[in-house]
């Protein structure tokens, strides 16, 4: 048997490559990938600029599928339907032991990686290996298993550490479960950490597939959602999801509109920035109320432009809490899956999933993302796309 994987050999070009069938060792399972969602790989397709854990032949970090092989004493069995979470945590550092986000595992040498360039080309100063081979990355999964393929999402068969898979309940489809990573999943923890409650007013800005996830999480918790955006295709999806108020960030009185909607508080209880661009970051921060919270989900690969903050005026005088992240904590996974089983959430997911393509047509998926007339885009590695 063989394993077909996706490559982006140069900007604007995709290629499906045939690689050896994956091998696994104890502590891992082999999964037949049913859906491989696109995250920010459309930016790689456009710019050929990679995150530290990927290169042109090692791409994709989301997925759902069916287990086809286990090892002795595995807690899983062949035929189990599972979510594959992104990352390759060590399982022993304080981040892992506390059930926090795998993308913050101490095995990842963030302190040694410069994300302003093509970080996969850098050497890890800890041991002289390329950054992509760092022990916290997914290439290390292939290395640990002695396998020539299978560590990444854009493949027909994928190796997954057992700690990174979760069984899918019987009433949850692969299609809905596939939103458990970089959309609803990666925003679940941020909304949870901001303690969004029923009746709170939240702002979501820079809406794309991450913003849609933040909206779904806030609406699920009973919050009133204000969206700051100007892409009419996506704003229409927001309205259908249940967003009542949309503000154009180019309006001269955009902040006054937010103050009018939030009354005496003059700002939102929590604000979520999902684009990574300073234009939206500055406006989102200004929209938080005193003692409000701002969570930043968005980031731009290779962007070294800092977000300038006037500490006294923008943070201290208003006592705004500012943080960010881009993954679901391990201890939040049960709550996330429960959320995905909710009927109204499933309705929102169907609105958020806008395009589905076979993996051989990945270029069409990337182009859809780049058009900005898309939400979440799925690839089907086994060429069985429903559309």
Image: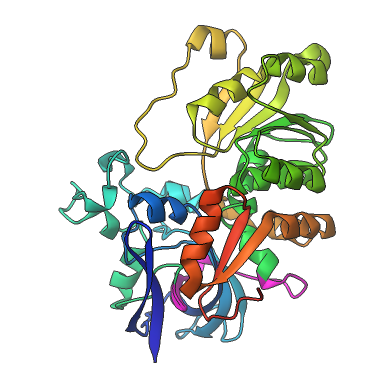
Quick check: is 331 in the magenta stretch? Answer: no
- The answer to whether residue 38 shows anywhere in this view is no
Where residue 128 sits: x, y (%)? 15, 53
Determine whether 58 is above or below 384 in the image: above
Determine whether 259 is above or below 325 in the image: above
Determine whether 42 is above or below 378 in the image: above
User: What segment is highlighted magenta in the picture?
Assistant: 155-174
**127 and 204: which one is in front?**
204
Give the side of residue 357 with respect to residue 245, left or right: left
**103 and 227: which one is in front?**
227
Quick check: is 167 in the magenta stretch? Answer: yes
- The extreme left residue here reads 128
**316 and 10: which one is in front?**
10
Q: Quadrant of the N terminus?
A: bottom left
Question: Looking at the image, which residue is at 58% across and 49% down?
Answer: 186
Determine whether 165 is above or below 122 in the image: below
Where residue 248 sits: x, y (%)? 68, 27
Question: Looking at the image, which residue is at 67% across and 41% down?
Answer: 192
Residue 144 location, quadrant: bottom left
- The answer to whether residue 128 shows anywhere in this view is yes
Q: Quadrant of the C terminus?
A: bottom right
Where residue 98 sits: x, y (%)? 52, 49
Give the side of residue 321 with respect to residue 58, left or right: right
Question: Looking at the image, which residue is at 66% across and 20% down?
Answer: 287
Q: How many marks?
A: 0
Where residue 205 sits: x, y (%)? 63, 33
């Amino acid at each position: 048997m063989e394993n077909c994987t996706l490559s982006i050999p140069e900007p604007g070009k995709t290629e499906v490559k045939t690689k050896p069938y994956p091998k696994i060792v104890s502590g891992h399972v082999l999964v037949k990938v049913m859906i491989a969602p696109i995250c920010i790989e459309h930016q790689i397709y456009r710019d050929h600029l990679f995150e530290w854990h990927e290169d042109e032949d090692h791409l994709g970090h989301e997925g759902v599928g069916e287990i086809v092989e286990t090892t002795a004493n595995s807690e899983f069995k062949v035929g189990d339907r599972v979510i594959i979470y992104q990352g390759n945590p060590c399982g022993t550092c304080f981040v892992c032991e506390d059930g926090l986000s795998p993308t913050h595992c101490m095995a990842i040498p963030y302190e040694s990686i410069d994300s302003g360039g093509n970080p996969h080309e850098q050497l890890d100063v800890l041991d002289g290996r390329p950054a992509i081979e760092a022990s916290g990355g997914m290439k290390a999964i292939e290395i640990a298993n002695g396998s020539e393929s299978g560590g990444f999402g854009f493949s027909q068969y994928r190796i997954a550490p057992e700690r990174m898979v979760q069984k899918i309940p019987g009433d949850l489809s692969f299609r809905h479960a596939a939103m458990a990573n970089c959309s609803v999943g990666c925003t679940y923890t941020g909304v949870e950490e901001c303690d969004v409650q029923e009746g709170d007013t939240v702002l979501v800005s820079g809406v794309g597939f991450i913003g849609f996830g933040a909206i779904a999480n806030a609406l699920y918790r009973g919050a009133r959602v204000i969206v700051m955006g100007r892409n009419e295709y996506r704003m229409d999806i927001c309205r259908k999801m249940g967003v009542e108020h949309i503000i154009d960030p180019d309006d001269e009185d955009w902040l006054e509109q937010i103050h009018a909607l939030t009354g005496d508080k003059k700002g939102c209880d929590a604000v979520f920035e999902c684009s990574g661009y300073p234009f939206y970051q500055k406006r989102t921060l200004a929209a938080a109320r005193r003692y409000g919270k701002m969570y930043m989900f968005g980031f731009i690969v290779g962007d070294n432009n800092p977000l300038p903050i006037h500490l006294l005026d923008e943070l201290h005088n208003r006592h705004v809490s500012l943080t960010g992240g881009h993954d679901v904590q391990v201890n939040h996974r049960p709550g996330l899956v429960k959320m995905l089983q909710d009927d109204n959430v499933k309705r929102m997911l169907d609105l958020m999933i806008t395009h589905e393509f076979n993996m051989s047509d990945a270029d069409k998926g990337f182009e859809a993302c780049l058009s900005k007339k898309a939400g979440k885009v799925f690839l089907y590695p086994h060429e069985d796309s429903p559309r």
